[in-house]
Image (cartoon, rainbow, N blue to C red):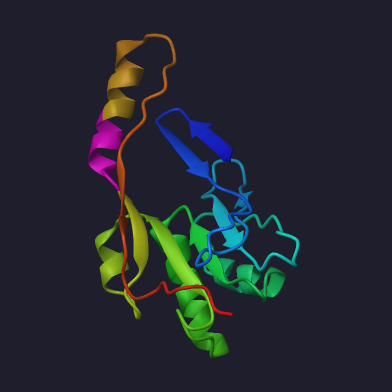
Amino acid sequence: MARTRNSVGDKTVSRGTKEPNAHSKVSPMSEVEAPLVAVILSSQAAVPIIETIPGDPSAGAVVFDRAPEATAILTMSDWQAITVLDEAVRRGINIPEHVSVVGFDGTAEAARTTPPLSTVAQNIVQKGRLAAAMVFANGPPKQIVMPVQLVVRASTARPRG
């Protein structure tokens, strides 16, 4: 297992799972203070590290250019996932038949995409309140693990193959 941590969350990602209907590899990709992007590839391919800038409309193109054989893409922002969906349309890539796409945040916009975006929903308001309380408490840094919920919509499917 690979574990990533930040001041208000804890994410665990499995690598090289042997489950029969699972994508083969997961690799986190990040840029300082940018959404984390993970690309899941077939077991024969190396997993690239892809860095994107938050809100960059070309992020989807970068992901497809650097990982054309990806079977699934997980972004740590619904907005980044939406750029992936937009780029898939431009390239004629069928979602989820060719590649599954999952965002992170659970924004209302995720339900309105075509196809509707699967997302890992978090309580953004609660996260902001906890962060503000920690700052104003002027105490030592601490880690708080917040619950998330996987919202499965039409942008994901079983791995191809």
Relative side of 98 to 125, left or right: right
Measuring from the top left, give residue 20's x and y in whole percent: 53, 65
Measuring from the top left, give residue 125's x and y in whole percent: 24, 40
Q: Quadrant of residue 108?
A: bottom left
Measuring from the top left, give residue 58's x and y in whole percent: 58, 70
- Helix, strand or loop: magenta stretch: helix
Nearer to the camera, 15 or 82: 15
Who's the residue at 50% across and 41% down the image?
A: 12
Relative side of 20 to 127, left or right: right
Image position of 100 with respect to 131: above or below: below
Who's the residue at 24% across and 36% down the image?
A: 126
Nearer to the camera, 72 or 24: 24
Measuring from the top left, give residue 49's x and y in whole percent: 69, 55
> What range of the chain is rendered magenta?
122-129
Image position of 124 with respect to 128: above or below: below
Who's the residue at 43% across and 55% down the image?
A: 77
Quadrant of the drawing holding the N terminus: top right
